[in-house]
Image: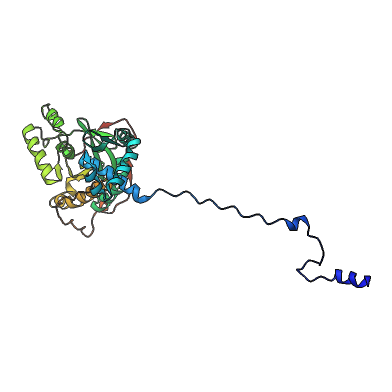
Amino acid sequence: MASMKQSIAKTRVPGKQALGARRSPAMKAEAPKALPVASPPKEPSLGMLERGIDLLEMLAKNGPSGIAELAKKADCAPVTATRLLRVLQTRGFAVCDETNSTWRLGTRWNAYAQAAVEQDALATTAMPFLTALGIAAGENAYIRVRDGMSSETIAVYRTDPALRVYTDVGARGPLHAGTSRMLLAHAPEAVQTQLLTQRLPRFTPATRTDPTWIAADLQRIRARGYLITADEVVPGAVSVGAPVRDASGEVVAVMFISAPTMRMRPPRPRALVSIVQDAAAKLSHALGYTRSETMITAQPVPRKPGAPAWSMPSPAMTIRTSTQPTMSRAG
């Protein structure tokens, strides 16, 4: 009988515990429950970010504005616009005038604007468009800005190393002659008056120095939206330029191509106007300018069979890196 009990105790069903056997402490303990996984922090809403940027752009373009007008143009509820502007106000990007309940840009932008200038933001942004212009026109392309009472070249695209470069990066030039007159045409009236009351230097027989003629031409430039000059600064150089605008609509640069007269005989300069204007308009859009403007429509002159090597572009670009300017004699 004892031997039968021992035999039964030894015979166990797989997966079953022997009858009457005690459970070990390890078997009594329950398996630990998995801790809940913390959800990752949510990213800021891109929609809210876009609305905040829209509000700032409206303030930059329209100046001090009421919350209802801002909310309508930003396509959001007034309460949402107010909440976003309050956040921007805490960082100095927007300011509310409590006396008349209007909003305007904050002073924090001054530091950012200066930082953008120091980092050559305009030149860096312009290079893809300057490159496209140089390739399309088959000529070297340039960007120039106004600096006080003179102009400065901040970017150059060399379509072909064999082509003559009429101005180097960092070179300075006059405002009253060449394509820089586009910058003078859109400069503050005080700058125009001060410059035109000075004795203006003559660089070539074609340089215009008569203040009356220049003042009238500034109006023509603003009305046309482009500028073609020949021999005004460098003999034998023809340039075609168009204005570049920022988000506020202010002209901040002139984009132009320049080439020897032998390659710029009529009607080629006039035919290149639309190409230059298109490149300047695309750069302006990249800078935040959205207003559409009437552009001159002109068909580019087709390349003739057996055209010289200058019509086959070879990319090379330069942007401003030095702070030591030189004098430019570009057209």
Image spot of residue 53 (x, y percent):
30, 45
Is residue 161 visible in the rendered image? The answer is no
Is residue 122 visible in the rendered image? The answer is yes
Left or right: residue 34 compared with residue 258: right
Residue most toward the left? Answer: 212
Figure colour scheme? rainbow
Image spot of residue 110 (x, y percent):
29, 33
Q: Residue 164 appears in which quarter of the rendering?
A: top left
Image spot of residue 55 (x, y percent):
27, 44
Left or right: residue 264 compared with residue 76: left
Residue 29, relative to residue 168: is it above or below?
Answer: below
Quadrant of the drawing holding the N terminus = bottom right
Q: Residue 302 appears in which quarter of the rendering?
A: bottom left
Q: Nearer the viewer, residue 56 or 275?
A: 56
Residue 31, relative to residue 189: is it above or below?
Answer: below
Image spot of residue 155 (x, y percent):
29, 41
Q: Nearer the viewer, residue 269 or 18?
A: 18
Q: Nearer the viewer, residue 23 or 319?
A: 23
Left or right: residue 143 compared with residue 217: right
Residue 243, relative to residue 100: is it above or below?
Answer: below
